[in-house]
Amino acid sequence: MSDEKTVLVEDTDGVRIITLNRPDRLNALNDSIMAPLADATREAAQDPAVGCVVITGAGRGFCSGGDLKGDRAPADVTPELGGPVEQGHARLRSHMETPRLLHEMGKPTIAMINGPVAGAGIGIAGACDLRFAAQSATFLSAFDRIGGGGDFGSTWFWTKILGTAKARELMFMGEKFDADAALAFGLYTRVFPDETLREESLKFAKKMAAGPRMGWRYMKANLNLAEDAQFEAHLDQESLFMGLSTQATARIYKAMKSEKP
């Protein structure tokens, strides 16, 4: 097995870039990458120096989904861990902390989609607040091709993003979208030429990292609550967080201003 890292981490101007690094397999997810990816996402969420998180893939693809060709050691049946079904569920659920953290962390998250995205990869992309794609990027749900029900939050995120009718069309019909069709369908936020994708994505990311971080935190919490909460509960949180965010921003601005010579 190669000693090369399967997940790369880079910091630039308050932006944490997390790169899936299995380019020979279009960054397909296996045990060697899923645990480090969840760890890297958790560290980005907890690091106060990070103001925005960008997730992308090495080589010519973003993420082609789960690696169906990899071998996995047989599970030992034990009273504590159960059999292969129970252990498989626990293993997959632990790896699915990646999309949960991308969605819930109090920082803007961006999927920089540099090529094909499919399967579990669309869950990772859907977990992010924004999706910037290269012109060469394609989008495929792919779960129908393996008889799978969907994972990595894909059915939840895309129902929230697109609405139930469009999400069902995406999942059941299994059509492959090119970048322009994906943009029109509502899957991508912006599409850029391949050669400028990184530059344009980081331009937005750095702008947000340099922006009102407490404002982004409370704004994202409001947006997440709006997905499921009753309207009155949402208004209660919105009014509370508006006061907290503006007070925090004003105090930070005053503190930074007083530090200047």
Image (spheres, grey):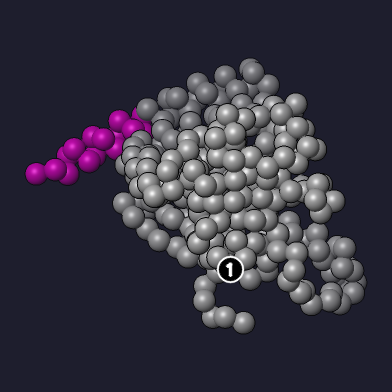
Q: Residue at x 64, y 18 (%)?
A: 231
Q: Is residue 88 left or right of residue 41?
A: right
- Residue 200 visible in rendering: yes
Viewer-nearest residue: 47 or 160: 160
Q: Is residue 100 magenta?
A: no
Crowding at dot 1, Cα within 10 Å, few <14 / some 14-19 / many 20+, comes out as: few
Give the image location of residue 241, x and y in percent: 48, 28
Q: Residue at x 40, y 37 (%)?
A: 214
Viewer-nearest residue: 157 or 251: 157
Q: Residue at x 31, y 51 (%)?
A: 13
Give the image location of residue 107, x and y in percent: 47, 43
Is residue 213 placed above or below 55 in the rendered structure?
A: above
- Residue 51 visible in rendering: no
Give the image location of residue 78, x and y in percent: 89, 74
Viewer-nearest residue: 22 or 37: 22
Give the image location of residue 151, x and y in percent: 74, 50
The residue that mark 1 highlights is 24
Q: Amino acid at mark 1?
A: Asp
Q: Is residue 253 magenta?
A: yes
Tell me where the magenta segment starts and ends, as one range: 247-261
Q: Is residue 88 left or right of residue 64?
A: right
